[in-house]
Image: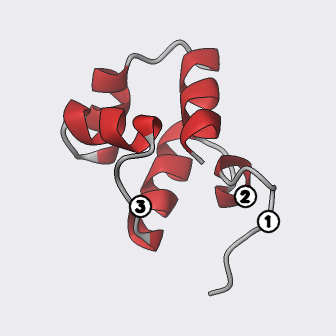
Amino acid sequence: MSMRLQTLRTAMGLPQKALAARVGCAQSEISRIEQGSRTVSVERLQQLAAALEVPVGALLEDGTTLAA
């Protein structure tokens, strides 16, 4: 997921700080997620997807979706 997040974020032209502001977290959290050193909760995954205006599955490397 870390590479997908970074790819989608940069494709939108968003710096980490701008994405963090949209999600409501610190820029350092976005950085750690993109580095793969932080686990992401389902809630945070949903927030990231909403901030990037993509379905949750777009953030998952294999394209699968989460069960509710």
Q: Badge 3 is on which residue? A: 40
Q: Determine whether, in the image, residue 29 is placed left or right of residue 41.
A: left
Image coordinates for residue 13, horizontal then vertical, percent: 53, 12
Residue at the extreme right = 63
Q: Secondary structure at mark 1?
A: loop
Is label 3 in contact with label 2 (beta carbons under 8 Å)?
no
**Residue type, numbered disc 2:** Gly
Q: Badge 1 is on which residue? A: 64
**Residue type, numbered disc 1:** Thr
Q: Badge 2 is on which residue? A: 57
Where, by quadrant of the figure, is residue 10 drawn?
A: top right
**Viewer-nearest of discs 3 and 2:** 3
- Mark 2, Cα crowd under 10 Å, few <14 / some 14-19 / many 20+, is some
- Image quadrant where one finds the C terminus: bottom right
Question: Distance between the Cα atoms at labels 3 and 2?
Answer: 14 Å
**Residue at left offset 60%, top offset 42%:** 53
Q: Secondary structure at mark 2?
A: helix
Is label 2 in contact with label 1 (beta carbons under 8 Å)?
yes
**Residue type, numbered disc 3:** Val
Image coordinates for residue 55, horizontal then vertical, percent: 69, 54
47 or 63, which is in the foreground? 63
